[in-house]
Image (cartoon, helix red, strand yellow):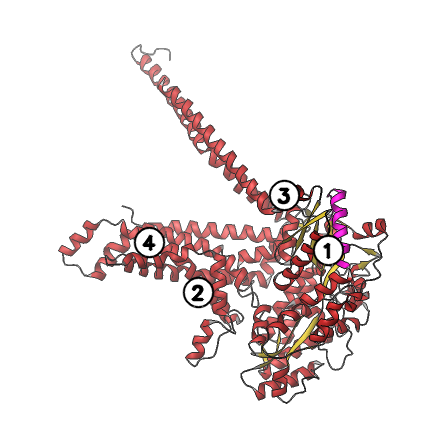
Amino acid sequence: MSTMSPATKPYEDMQLAFEAERRKTKTRNFIKGILFLLPSIILFSVFLFYPMMKTVYLSFFLTDASGATTVFVGLQNYIQLFTSSIFLKSFKSTFLFVLYIVPATIIISLFLAVLANEKLKGVGIFRTIFSSTMGISVAAASVFWLYLFNPTMGLLNEILGFLGMEGIGWLTDPAWALVAVSITTIWMNIGFTFLILLGGLQSIDQSLYESANIDGAGYFYKLRRITVPMLSPTLFFVLTVTIINAFQTFGQIDILTQGGPQNETNLIVYSIYREAFVNYQFGAASAQAVILFILILLMTALQFKFGEKKVHYQ
Amino acid sequence: MFKKNLMFLLALGLLFVLAACGSGEEGESTAEADESAESSSEESSGEAASGEAQTVTFWHSMGGAGQEALNGIVEDYNASQDAVQVNAEYQGSYDESLTKFNAVAGSDSAPTMIQTFEIGTMSMINSGQIKPIQDFIDADGYDMSSLEENIINYYKLDDTFYSMPFNSSTPVMYYNKDAFEAAGLDPEAPPETFEEVEEASRAITESNPEMKGFALQAYGWLWEQLLANQGALLLNNDNGRGDTATEIGWTEEEGKSIFNWVENMVNDGTFANYGTNGDNMMAGFLAEDVSMFVQSSASSRDVIDNAPFEVGIAYLPHPGEKEREGVVIGGASLWMIDGKPEAEQNAAWEFMKYLQTPQVQAEWHVGTGYFAINPEAYNEDVAVQAHEEMPQLQVTVDQLQETTSSYATQGALMDMLPEGRKVMETALEAVYNGGDVDEEYSNAVERYNQAIEQANQARGGE
């Protein structure tokens, strides 16, 4: 075995040295990478990872009013949630809410964005108007809608009355409350979604349209074959963000309905708030928060698995 | 060489980033401090202005007319002497204020005194963050017996005052006298029982199809009052006053009487549903969409001033087959926060005593519709005059003074009451929207009992 040919030895030495050098560079790169990441790792740990671990921990306990743990109950909080008809209703309402909001927001915003993307005189004014809801805070928008929905002097019921229809108990009728909150939310979301989609439309290469024009393609053909595919990364982003936002809706619920009537609009985030800060059951609230986290994680993962395939990156 | 330089630069860059983060956090925390205690700046300016005035931070939950009246009282107090400077800060509703308090309790940002609603009494005592008012009463030799007896009954627990009563109200029934007349009803003899309310509602709706008869906000506090008015307990063990409550205290007959009453009116088409929104209900009353509603007497000044018709105020209705028992004191009291310097606490105590004086109470009563917790206030000129002008204000006082003292009207004590209210509100809303009374009732009772059980378990009591 010791009969190594003198010719290969230097080569192997070189190989070894090369390996060592490579490993060294690798470690160095790794450290360098970590150094770059360190600021966000530190910030994330303090403001995200630690609270998250704490939430999981709290979900196994009962607490007193200040949030200090009193009794360890294991999985009891979770079991109670899944057997509670109120929580299951929250669950259902949340999904319905997402279903009402996401498609409507995206379709309306896309429609407005395509309109506002036309090169017309004074289109800037319309762009400003369409994106203006972005500049309105959730609280202000909710109060504004609260007055529109007002049963006594609300504009919506006045219009219905004018048309000879009976007024609707927008925020008190269980059949309408979630719809009313959804309308408000869609209206509020349009500004942001519109702006992002318009940005996406404007970055589409004009030469694509030019060559399509030469080929004599019609408007809707261009919309279907050029605009939507080229816009797909933006659409995907908007979809993900709108879904997450819909799951986390809080402000408009608190101002418009406080979760009522009959818990019809008691979305999970609002239910967490009530549980923690009105009922002072921080354990049960944490358990709901953990469930919501898993839910959003799953939804986002699913979207990336199935949705992203349809996305066309340039 | 180049690489080493690069590493050095990198490290330097990192330092910058970290420094930026550090200062960012600092910025945040100062912003927070600004927000949570606007008083701190006011504090220093106040001190500079009047030499050695002791600042007292007072968190309250009075909005609207109440806030105006309260600010007036605080200003008068600050102007009347140099030793104490009171900073009244509005902290949102009682729930919100209590949440904020729990977040800052034990820190420097905590207020000196805080106003909390009556059902928060037990959780304040259990929180361990407060100093019983009894300590100050004993040290000062202050006499609490001048206060309204029913108020003392509510706030005195085991012969100890934990908090200082301040703003108390009871529920009353507001009605539209003009509408009553138009419907051929006697505006001076408002309905007293559930059955009479149903009848009057039918008469109103018949004479004016645009107007509904009666509205009841889905509000847990009103549920508690309607129970007490028929002599029913909210919690067992003498409303949680004898021993910690373990389940509900009312019987099925007592609880269902309210549900059935509402259901009858819903079926008659005479009931106006405003859900849980009290403001909308009041707006509906003022716009003559509904002829009667039940709400806290604290709104009486608002309603009387804003109504374009003559407003009548009547006692809270009760089921016909039961005697009227009376009402529970609602409203809030003032709590001294533990862990503050003694001088600051003593200053707050001085202010609390000032709030009990007849003049201040008279002003407060007239300005809002809350009671004067000190009955002598009714002899003050302001009050006498106001009662002449607005005899309705007198009704709210009479109702309280006619209340029979019993466990039912002393009110319940438990830390889960806010949760219980929400349970009853949900059930009431369901009935308003045509839900089945038996089913909603038994669900509500089950959830109420569950909430009690869980609260007891969380305290480690079992």
Tag 2, which secondary structure?
Answer: helix
State the image coordinates of residue B205 (x, y, percent, origin top left). Answer: 58, 85
Q: Which of A170 and B260 is in front in this view?
A: A170
Query: Does residue B276 appear anywhere in the picture?
Result: no
Who comes first in sequence, dot 1 or dot 3? 3
Mark 3, Cα crowd under 10 Å, few <14 / some 14-19 / many 20+, is few
Mark 4, Cα crowd under 10 Å, few <14 / some 14-19 / many 20+, is many
Tag 4, which secondary structure?
Answer: helix
Judging by the rendered image, the residue that carries numbered circle 2 is A183
What residue occupies the far bottom of the structure in this picture?
B184
Q: How far apart are marks 4 and 2 (CA)?
A: 20 Å
Per the rendered image, the range of residues in magenta is B337-356
In this view, the mark in front (4 or 3) = 3
Judging by the rendered image, the residue that carries numbered circle 3 is B45
The answer to whether mark 4 and mark 2 are in CB contact below 8 A is no
The answer to whether mark 4 and mark 1 are in CB contact below 8 A is no
Q: Is residue B216 magenta?
A: no
Judging by the rendered image, the residue that carries numbered circle 1 is B334
The answer to whether tags 4 and 3 share a subunit is no
Report the amino acid beneath label 2: Ile
Count the labels in the image. Answer: 4
Q: Distance between the residues labelled 4 and 1?
A: 54 Å
The answer to whether tags 2 and 1 share a subunit is no
Residue B188 quadrant? bottom right
Would residue A192 be found to the left or right of residue A249 on screen? left
Residue B182 quadrant? bottom right
Judging by the rendered image, the residue that carries numbered circle 4 is A197
Q: Distance between the residues labelled 1 and 3?
A: 26 Å
State the image coordinates of residue A3 (x, y, percent, origin top left). Answer: 34, 10
